[in-house]
């Protein structure tokens, strides 16, 4: 196999080994076989293109085109032209799949199902990384930079898994990179041919770096090992020194070490991991502030999403269709008019640093007023952002119901609909009998589902011997539930999912809600919700009442009134009717209730307060300085690479411009034109040689630049004009020098390869004159002020002028 063939094979293997880190994220893992097949085709196309041979950029372009065709056949064949060519409909299909994949990533816990959107994201990502690795390592023969895309692939997998990626995947990715480096080193060494040596002594062989077997040099191998060990060590040490990213579904992530307030955010795949991260934050940073006209806020949980699917490995949200947000949300399923329900209004303001796709709402909401691209999911009664919409800095108003069932109503609730019962009482076959038996034992003696639910809640929260601990390993699968029931230590995730699973074994429809507890009151009458208010709680269904909150987690939230023994069992109260002064639009004017002391508001003795506009939370999110800094950084990334091109364009225009009419001006224009021709040749790889005469320099440019006919004549013509200016007693000044310079530039471009032309345009070698000018001015200043020059000279020694170089 040729050297390039070995490199291509190693690049293919390295990409697959790095992609292995994504296997735990998506199941089933069959997507990996599909990605490997498409990656093999992509690599094969690159090998064929290099064998033709095609120019390097054209090889990469052909591979990219074939990759697009492959993805079209796999994911958008029905919308493609002739089932292969990506037309407008196929591009639209890709966009829809990517949007769906982004929503799925935010919706599902790890491992996520291999939906079409997620498959497109992971397979497409692997192919893009594979193309970058193949182009760098094989096409452009530079394996060292190929480690960056491989590291990016592993880092994405490690980031999405919450930092829990196995060390085995890291070793595989690192090994693939090292194999790639060694293959390139072997290929480069083989280009020098076999190194022969005499029968020198062992000491002599060691002194010159040869082994004792075949006379091959040890130094490159030893150096490669050292480089590999150093790269591996850097890869291990650098991530530990870099700032961690936290946040996700519930939290707002900040940069830094986790001790500061930060400003950035990321979205996590697993809401339970981000929930635990939020609870363990050292600083309870405010993410939501709200004002409500509810007389008591202890039941005003802010619900984000409901997890209603239990497959044995995790609780997840079912994949359901969404629609436009209606002006009035439909009445909650199962809620009877005979059950007391008070209508309240709440104005909510999210912090600028709080960013996630679901909108926190009191449950059940009946009307939501908010700007932006939001969609409504009817079954869970949740609002989800569309096309990148999120909660960052959102301010909105919600009308909702405080449902107040009596214990008697819950105890006498009729059987739920059969379809709902089937869907929400499913438990996996892998659920141990221990969970079922424990549920029966705890609820022994209960005569109805309500009494069973209360017994489960009290067993977890009061008399079961459980303790609350946020440091316990998170998990929602059957193994985590079994471990929790035995060890009796955990936090809201363990309590809520265990109670929901046990309720399902008893035939009670159950799901789990994730969101925030009501928060803490402020002196201005608003409620403040911090990261540490993140919470999960079970919702059980009772016909006539609907989905009903229970609170099994000790020391968190509050047990609902209808589950407490002292709850009155009187008749339901009538729904509160808005007064004449009530308006869905918040009023900025203070109300009489605002004079009520904060302590009285805290215990609900001031009556309902009219909703008002509220100030944004204290955390303003990303500052203007940060935005400007990022904008400048992006501008620098875009503009800096173009600076050599802009400088050469400006210098060329100045040199070839028509300035002045005197003989001295004409002579200066002649010398400037020759300088431009010399620099243009330098840009195309012909290094200037100041030791040659103009006539010899012209011949050298013609020979090395491959110039012919008019372009060659133009070089000699300008060289002759320069000799006239420099040496003739009465010089004849040349004319048409600018046209000659452009003719020579075009000739050099026609004779050069595509890569050389691109280098001459974007990274002209003659741009180094800017550095020379700077060092010359620095030398003048240092000489004038007596500052030692070695401090700059040591860094600019490699930029010396290339004089007396022969072609």
Image (spheres, rainbow, N blue to C red):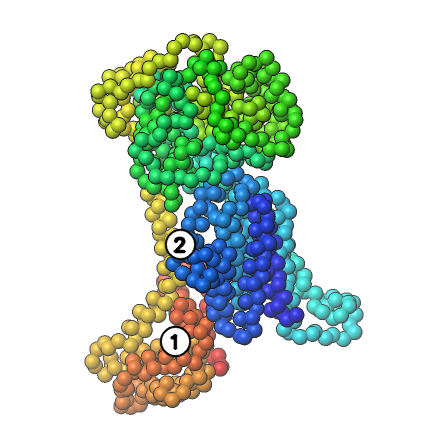
Query: In the image, residue 151 lies at what x, y percent?
Result: 55, 52
Q: Residue 485 appears in which quarter of the rendering?
A: top right
3D distance between C-alphas at marks 1 and 2: 48 Å
The quarter holding residue 260 reads top left
Q: Is residue 526 left or right of residue 443?
A: left
Callout 1: SS? helix
In the picture provided, is 797 more to the left or to the right than 467? left
* Chain-order first, disc 1 or disc 2: 2
Residue plotted at (53% across, 42% down): 112
Q: In the image, which disc is placed on residue 173?
A: none
**Residue 327 in the image, given as x and y percentages of width and height:** 30, 33
Residue at left 42%, top 29%?
A: 303
Q: Secondary structure at mark 2?
A: helix
Residue 416's place in the image compared with 59, above or below, is: above
Quarter of the image that includes the N terminus: bottom right
The image position of residue 164, as x and y in percent, is 58, 41
Question: What residue appears at the point 38 percent right and 29 percent down from the top-left corner?
Answer: 361
The 10 Å Cα crowd at callout 1, few under 14, some 14 to 19, many 20 or more, is many
Query: Picture coordinates of residue 99 (x, y %)?
Result: 42, 47
Are the residues flagged by discs 1 and 2 in contact, CB closer than 8 Å? no
Instruction: Name the residue carrying label 2.
Output: 92
Q: Is residue 351 above or below residue 100?
A: above
> Can residue 280 be seen from the camera position used here?
no
In front: 768, or 167? 167
Residue at the farthest left position: 661
Q: Residue at the location (62% across, 33% down)?
A: 429
Other-residue count near label 2 (Cα within 10 Å), few / some / many at <14 / 14–19 / ≥20:
some
Give the numbered dot on residue 679.
1
User: Can residue 300 be seen at all in this image of the molecule?
Assistant: yes
Question: Which is more toward the observer, 468 or 636?
Answer: 468
């Amino acid at each position: 196999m040729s050297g390039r063939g070995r490199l291509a094979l190693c690049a293919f293997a390295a990409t697959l080994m790095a992609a292995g880190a994504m296997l735990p994220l998506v199941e089933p893992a069959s997507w990996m076989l599909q990605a490997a097949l498409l990656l093999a085709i992509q690599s094969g196309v690159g090998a064929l293109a290099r064998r033709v041979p095609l120019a390097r950029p054209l090889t990469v372009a052909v591979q990219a085109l074939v990759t697009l065709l492959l993805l079209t056949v796999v994911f958008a064949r029905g919308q493609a032209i002739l089932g292969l060519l990506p037309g407008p409909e196929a591009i639209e299909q890709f966009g829809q799949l990517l949007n769906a994949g982004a929503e799925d990533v935010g919706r599902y816990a790890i491992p996520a199902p291999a939906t079409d959107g997620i498959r497109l994201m992971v397979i497409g990502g692997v192919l893009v990384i594979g193309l970058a690795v193949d182009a760098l390592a094989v096409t452009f023969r530079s394996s060292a930079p190929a480690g960056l895309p491989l590291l990016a692939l592993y880092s994405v997998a490690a980031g999405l898994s919450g930092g829990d990626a196995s060390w085995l995947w890291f070793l595989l990715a690192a090994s693939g990179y090292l194999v790639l480096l060694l293959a390139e080193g072997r290929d480069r060494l083989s280009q020098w041919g076999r190194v022969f040596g005499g029968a020198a002594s062992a000491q002599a062989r060691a002194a010159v770096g040869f082994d004792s077997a075949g006379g091959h040099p040890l130094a490159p191998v030893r150096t490669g090992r050292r480089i590999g060990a150093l790269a591996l060590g850097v890869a291990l040490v650098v991530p530990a020194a870099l700032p961690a990213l936290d946040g996700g579904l519930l939290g707002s992530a900040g940069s830094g070490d986790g001790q500061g307030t930060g400003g950035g955010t990321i979205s996590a795949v697993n809401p339970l991991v981000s929930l635990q991260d939020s609870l363990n934050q050292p600083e309870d940073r405010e993410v939501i502030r709200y004002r409500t006209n509810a007389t008591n806020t202890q039941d005003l949980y802010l619900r984000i999403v409901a997890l209603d699917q239990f497959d044995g490995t995790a609780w997840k949200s079912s994949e359901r269709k969404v629609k436009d947000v209606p002006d009035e949300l439909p009445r909650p399923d199962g809620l009877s008019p005979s059950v007391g329900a008070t209508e309240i209004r709440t104005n909510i303001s999210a912090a600028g640093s709080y960013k996630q796709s679901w909108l926190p709402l009191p449950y059940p909401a009946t009307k939501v007023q908010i700007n932006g691209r939001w969609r409504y999911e009817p079954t869970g009664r949740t609002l989800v952002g569309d096309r990148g919409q999120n909660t960052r800095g959102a301010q909105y108003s919600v009308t909702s119901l405080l449902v107040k069932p009596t214990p008697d109503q819950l105890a006498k609730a009729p059987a739920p609909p059969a379809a709902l019962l089937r869907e929400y009482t499913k438990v996996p076959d892998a659920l141990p009998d221990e969970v079922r038996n424990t549920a029966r034992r705890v609820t022994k003696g209960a005569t109805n589902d309500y009494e069973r639910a209360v017994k489960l809640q009290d067993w977890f929260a009061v008399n079961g011997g459980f303790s609350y601990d946020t440091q316990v390993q998170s998990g929602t699968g059957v193994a985590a539930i079994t471990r929790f029931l035995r060890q009796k230590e955990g936090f809201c995730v363990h309590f809520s999912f265990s109670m929901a699973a046990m309720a399902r074994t008893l035939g009670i429809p159950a799901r789990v809600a994730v969101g925030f507890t009501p928060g803490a009151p402020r002196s201005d009458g608003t409620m403040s919700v911090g990261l540490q208010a993140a919470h999960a709680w079970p919702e059980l269904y009772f016909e006539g009442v609907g989905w009903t909150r229970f609170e099994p987690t000790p020391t968190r939230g509050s047990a609902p009134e209808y589950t407490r023994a002292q709850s009155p069992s009187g008749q339901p109260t009538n729904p509160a009717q808005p007064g004449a002064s009530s308006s869905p639009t918040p009023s900025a004017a203070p109300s009489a209730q605002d004079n009520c002391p904060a302590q009285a508001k805290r215990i609900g003795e001031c009556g309902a307060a009219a909703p008002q506009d509220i100030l944004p939370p204290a955390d303003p999110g990303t500052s203007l300085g940060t935005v400007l800094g990022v904008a400048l950084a992006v501008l620098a990334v875009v503009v800096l690479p173009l600076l050599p091109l802009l400088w050469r364009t400006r210098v060329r225009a100045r040199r070839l411009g028509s300035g002045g009419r005197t003989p001295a001006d004409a002579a200066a224009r002649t010398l400037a034109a020759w300088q431009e021709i010399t620099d243009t040749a330098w840009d195309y790889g012909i290094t200037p040689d100041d030791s040659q005469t103009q006539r010899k320099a012209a011949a050298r440019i013609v020979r090395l630049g491959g110039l012919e006919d008019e372009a060659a004549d133009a070089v000699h013509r300008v060289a002759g004009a320069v000799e006239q200016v420099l040496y003739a007693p009465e010089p004849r000044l040349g004319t048409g020098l600018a046209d000659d310079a452009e003719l020579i530039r075009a000739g050099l471009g026609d004779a050069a390869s595509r890569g050389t032309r691109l280098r001459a345009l974007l990274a002209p070698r003659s741009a180094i004159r800017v550095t020379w000018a700077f060092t010359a001015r620095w030398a003048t200043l240092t000489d004038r002020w007596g500052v030692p020059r070695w401090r700059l000279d040591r860094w600019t020694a490699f930029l010396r002028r290339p004089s007396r170089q022969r072609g």
